[in-house]
Amino acid sequence: MVKIGIKSSAYFGLNDYTTGLKKLKAHGYDAVDYQEFISMDSPLYSMGEDELSCFLTKVASAAEENGVQIYQVHAIWPTAGDDTEEGRQKSLWYYRRSILGAKHLGCKRVVVHPWMPHGWSNGTKEEFFEINVRLMRELMPAARECNVYVCLENMPFRKGETFSTVEEWLAVLQEVNDEHAKACLDTGHLEAMGVDPYVCVLAIKDYLEAMHVHDSRRAMDLHLFPYQGVLDWEAFVRGLREIHFDGCIALETAVADGVPAPAKEPMQKALALLAKSIAAQVE
């Protein structure tokens, strides 16, 4: 059965997780993308290992009590400075900490963004390939020790730029060649790249372990609700159906904080219904 989930920040922050988990379950979600590891300023990074374990075990217990699976963890973004070796070493520490956190949460997946030593501008394809093979290989020992999949996410590079094709993304994972090296498919990023979602899903099927589901408009990363942008949802669903996808439709969008209270909860419920509709079509 295909699950539906949503990013944790749509319902709760670091400390209000019990109420948030209860509410997102009531709205119909089965799972959550835990995003408290995104900011390098998160208190999770300054906790000692025993304190971290204690805190995250409580979060995991609350999730279990409410019938919610912590399906994936989102590691840091932006990273610590991909253009220097010092920055890359720093980001590796944060990534490994997220992997350890996933273990304490009873979670099997950590989503990481690729290293981008030239930011959003072009570097050479060879350099980008080599540096991200290195990133994934550096994380494999921690992934194996914690029994976690490290899921490399596609980014919204414009068509023709480095790492803007499914083939380049897939080539990194194939080169790493480790059962713990997987993919996180971000649908909004895919649309920004101008890639057919049906073609992408079929190409990445052997590595597809996590998703960030939202809509966008070409060359922009807007994190819209599904069907508010220009993504070909029929093609996306058709691809997932053909590969017999049975994971989680994990939304990376949310009702804006500024929406007035009387309207916010109905909109949250409507968003969950959208996710359910996509999951039902896949099934």
Image (spheres, grey):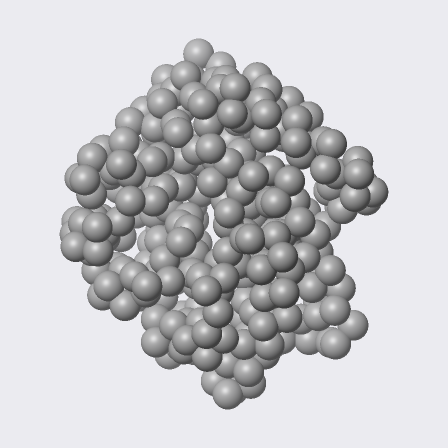
Image quadrant where one finds the N terminus: top left
What x and y, as percent, mark residue 139? 62, 65
Rendered position, 101 above or below 26: below
Residue occupying the point 74% across, 69% down: 89
Residue occupying the point 60% across, 38% down: 105
Query: 45 or 41, which lies in front?
Result: 45
What x and y, as percent, mark residue 277? 23, 33
Position of residue 235 in the picture relative to residue 143 (left or right)? left
Query: 173 or 221, which lies in front?
Result: 173
What x and y, as percent, mark residue 31? 43, 33
Rendered position, 187 above or below 33: below
What x and y, as percent, mark residue 72? 50, 44
Residue occupying the point 27% across, 31% down: 276
Position of residue 132 in the picture relative to residue 280 (left or right)? right
Residue 250 seen from this side: yes
Rendered position, 58 above or below 193: above
The picture quadrant where one finds residue 165 is bottom left
Residue occupying the point 63% across, 57% down: 145
Residue 37 seen from this side: no
